[in-house]
Amino acid sequence: MRKKLDEIPGIVYIFEQPIANKLAEMLRGVEGTIVVKLFGPDLDVLNAKIQEIYELMRQIPGIADL
């Protein structure tokens, strides 16, 4: 996964262990196996990127509650 993610310019990602992940969920208020968060000053750009990510992720077998 790191190899593929490293190919995307400007992306920041982390991989966490289960206990660290549970603690992070409590601190961030987001629970899930995969969490995608976008940050930026331009809401139009963020909304466009959200739609792109949604369209890509909904093609992944097993994805639920997207």
Image: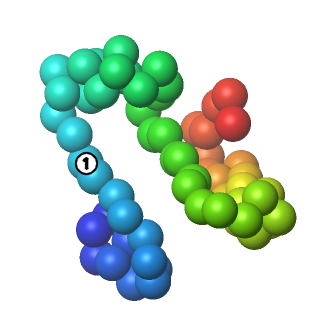
Residue positioned most to the front: 41
The kind of secondary structure element at disc 1 is: loop
Q: Residue at x 28, y 19 (%)?
A: 22
Residue 6's quadrant in the figure?
bottom left
Q: Quadrant of residue 62?
A: top right
39 relative to 48 in the view: left or right? left
Q: Quadrant of the C terminus?
A: top right
User: Mark 1 — residue?
Assistant: 15
Which part of the image, by quadrant, shows the N terminus? bottom left
Residue lying at 46% horizontally and 40% vertically, measured from the top left? 34
Is 40 placed left or right of 55 in the picture? left
In this picture, is 6 found above or below 44? below
Q: Is residue 30 left or right of residue 7?
A: right
Position of residue 26 measured from the top left corner of the image (x, y, whole percent): 36, 15
Residue at position x 17%, y 21% in the image: 19
Tell me where residue 8 sits by quadrant.
bottom left
- From this view, report whether residue 7 is shown above or below residue 37: below
Residue 52 shows up from this direction: no
Q: Name the amino acid type tagged 1.
A: Phe
For the rendered model, the colour scheme is: rainbow
Numbered label tally: 1
Seen from the viewer's position, the closer of residues 1 and 62 is 1
Q: Is residue 17 visible?
A: yes
Q: Is residue 11 above or below residue 24?
A: below
Q: Residues within 10 Å of mark 1 (few under 14, many from 20)?
A: few
Identify the residue at horizontal 41%, vertical 26% (top origin). Answer: 28
